[in-house]
Image: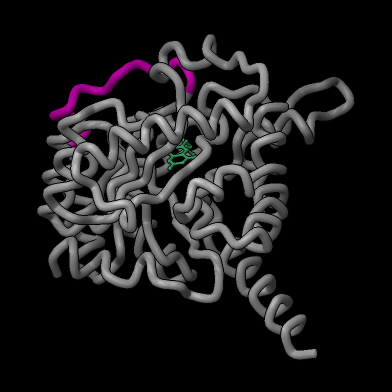
Amino acid sequence: MTSVQASRGLLEPLGRTRVMGVVNVTPDSFSDGGAYPTAVDAVRAGLAMAAEGADIVDVGGESTRPGAGRVDPAEELRRVLPVVTELAAAGVAVSVDTTRPAVAEAALAAGAAVINDVSGAADRDLLAVAAERAVPYVLMHTRGVSADMATRAVYGDVVSEVVAELRERLDAVFAAGIAPERVIVDPGIGFAKESGHNWTLLAHLDAIAALGHPLLVGTSRKSFLGSLLADADERPRPAGERDDATQATTALLAADGVWAVRVHAVRAAADAVRVVQAWREAREWR
Ligand SMILES: Nc1nc2ncc(COP(=O)(O)O)nc2c(=O)[nH]1
């Protein structure tokens, strides 16, 4: 199946929020680093996510954890390509989480259906790949790179600044030839943002939705949830114990009508999304 065939339908109205499962093939991602030490483990996890209800599986080979160093492109490719290939061959819709043109190109050739660019459209060559291959492209807001983005988390009005910066990046995306109807926008929860910024953005997603593109939102297991759930000694809740809080955000995001949520615990998210769908349909019945 070609990338375009695999991506067909992903942007069609579905009546519910889509679930994007996360498979980080990295030793050091913040919440599941090392969970999939081999491609076989990663493929097994991706297939399980698809069986649990993931509409898309996001495969990444480079940690975006704040402060993380860069991974050599060849190593990133070595990590993601076998996983993308196997999952796509099994009919799973795959997004490739990368900021590198060569990795995106190879992943699309191997059957990936979506480019998930966490760089904020920083690389013109990556934009050219997305334009040329005519696949859905995720524009995520960030500032700087993993190594320095924590120092960039300074905002006067985070909502208006994130919207303005996304609008400016959208101009670059369109100028590169990516069709507007294939662009998905993501506020970049946790990317160059403090906890309070994340909550404010989540509470005002309508301002980001006003840009006119489907929204992808990734709250899963992130540190702003850990801070919220800190214990009496102010120790943050560990990443692996944030899934219940994540599912609460999933229900709220689904009620807001976002295009997709990016999560680690897929079955719980798929259940939450179906509850919201049934709830909204029941409201329409009266
Ligand atoms: N589009 C998008 N991609 C992402 N990739 C990685 C992470 C970091 O989380 P992880 O380490 O759990 O993958 N978060 C996002 C996100 O919020 N949105």
In this orientation, which residue lies closer to the viewer: 102 or 13?
A: 13
| Vertical position of residue 98 compared to residue 22: above or below | above
Residue drawn at x 67%, y 27% is 197
Answer with the quarter of the image where residue 277 lies: bottom right
Residue at 40% from the left image edge and 67% from the top image edge: 50
Quarter of the image where the C terminus is located: bottom right
Q: Is residue 95 visible?
A: no
Residue 210 placement, left or right of 138: right
Task: Give the left or right position of residue 147, taking residue 160 as reference.
Answer: left
Q: How is the image coloured?
A: one colour
Image position, residue 82 (x, y; %):
17, 50
Q: Quadrant of the N terminus?
A: bottom left
Q: Bounds of the magenta span?
A: 66-77
In magenta stretch: residue 94: no
Residue 86 place in picture, x, y as percent: 20, 60
Count of all numbered marks drawn on residues in the image: 0
Point 53% across, 44% down: residue? 218
Image side of residue 37 versus residue 202, left or right: left
Q: Position of residue 31 (x, y in %)?
A: 52, 36
Query: Furthest-bottom residue in view?
Result: 286
Residue 125: percent from left, percent from top: 15, 32
Dividing the picture into quadrants, the one containing residue 239 is top right
Who's the residue at 64% across and 55% down the image? 253
Q: Quadrant of residue 174?
A: top left
Q: Is residue 51 visible?
A: yes
On whether residue 68 falls in the magenta region, the answer is yes
